[in-house]
Image (spheres, rainbow, N blue to C red):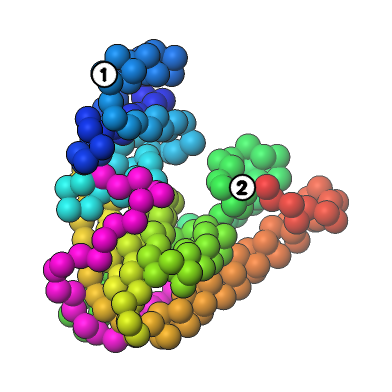
């Protein structure tokens, strides 16, 4: 099976998106789509993702058993969420998985994975704490710092946005602004079908402040790890300009 490409398609302009993966080259995929006379289709290159399964590989949202491409807005759901106003968050660097000398050598020599934010990563154990449950995640500080601001900007501008977290915990946030509140749906994509872990209404002002605090805390962790990395490579390699970890 050629796992490099997947296709999302519509049989007519009013139908839902569907998906296929075939053992074909990219040139054959184009011909295949034209032969099927699809109303619309998008071919996704999966090679930029590290997972093996389609539901983990793309920026496509699977919501209410339908696929939505990133440029499409999902209408505000009819279901009734929990109106909780706010929730707590706990972010702690996981010392067990903290970068060590071997990791720093790989980063310096560019032998490790180059994420969309660079080679250096800092794992943060993160918990979203509600009155009746806790959602625990393993997040990369640098990924939050790079990608979460774009999410908040889009949400503020368009009253709708999706945040996609690919590593290590794979989840997607679907968010809408309605009046003075933000509706936030947290989907985990660890299984074959996404699971909604929480669906809540929170205060809009609080939510944007919450995201800013999250970004700041993650940046502090990322900066401290970068400082440790720079001290290590300066001592081992005599490199005073090691700060570029991309």
* Residue 102 shows up from this direction: no
Q: Which residue: 17% across, 53% down? A: 64
Q: Is residue 44 above or below residue 221?
A: above
- Residue 133 spot, x, y in % from top left: 21, 75
Label 2 crowd bin: few (<14), some (14–19), many (20+), radius 10 Å: many
Residue 12 among those drawn in magenta:
no
In which image quadrant can residue 220 be found?
bottom right
The one of 28 and 143 positioned closer to us in this rendering: 28
Q: Is residue 111 above or below residue 140?
A: above
Query: Which region is colored magenta?
Result: 67-96
Q: What SS does tag 1 mark?
A: helix
* Residue 147 shows up from this direction: yes
Q: CA distance from mark 2 to mark 1?
A: 41 Å
- Residue 151 spot, x, y in % from top left: 47, 64
Query: Which label is found at residue 36?
Result: 1
Classify the position of the N terminus by image quarter: top left
Q: What SS does tag 2 mark?
A: loop
Query: Which label is found at residue 119?
Result: 2
Q: Nearer the viewer, mark 2 or mark 1?
A: 1
Q: Which residue: 69% across, 58% down? A: 229
Q: Is residue 210 left or right of residue 16?
A: right
- Residue 85 spot, x, y in % from top left: 29, 86
The one of 244 and 196 positioned closer to us in this rendering: 196
Q: Is residue 103 left or right of residue 38?
A: right
Residue 85 among those drawn in magenta:
yes
């Amino acid at each position: 099976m050629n796992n490099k490409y997947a296709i999302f398609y519509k049989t007519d302009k009013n139908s839902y998106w569907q998906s296929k993966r075939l053992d074909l080259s990219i040139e054959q995929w184009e011909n295949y789509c034209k032969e099927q006379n699809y109303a619309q289709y998008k071919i996704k290159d999966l090679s930029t993702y590290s997972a093996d399964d389609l539901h983990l590989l793309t920026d496509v949202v699977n919501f209410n058993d339908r696929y939505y491409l990133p440029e499409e807005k999902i209408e505000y759901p009819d279901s009734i969420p929990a109106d909780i106003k706010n929730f707590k968050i706990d972010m702690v660097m996981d010392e067990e998985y903290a970068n060590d000398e071997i990791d720093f050598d790989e980063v310096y020599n560019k032998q490790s994975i180059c994420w969309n934010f660079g080679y250096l990563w800092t794992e943060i154990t993160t918990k979203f704490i509600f009155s009746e449950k806790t959602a625990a995640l393993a997040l990369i500080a640098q990924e939050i710092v790079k990608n979460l601001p774009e999410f908040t900007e889009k949400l503020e501008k368009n009253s709708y946005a999706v945040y996609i977290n690919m590593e290590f915990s794979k989840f997607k946030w679907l968010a809408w602004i309605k009046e003075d509140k933000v509706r936030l749906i947290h989907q985990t994509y660890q299984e074959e079908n996404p699971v909604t872990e929480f669906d809540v209404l929170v205060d809009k002002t609080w939510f944007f402040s919450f995201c800013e605090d999250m970004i700041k805390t993650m940046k502090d962790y990322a900066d401290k790890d970068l400082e440790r990395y720079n001290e290590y490579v300066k001592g081992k390699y005599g490199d005073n300009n090691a700060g570029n970890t991309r």
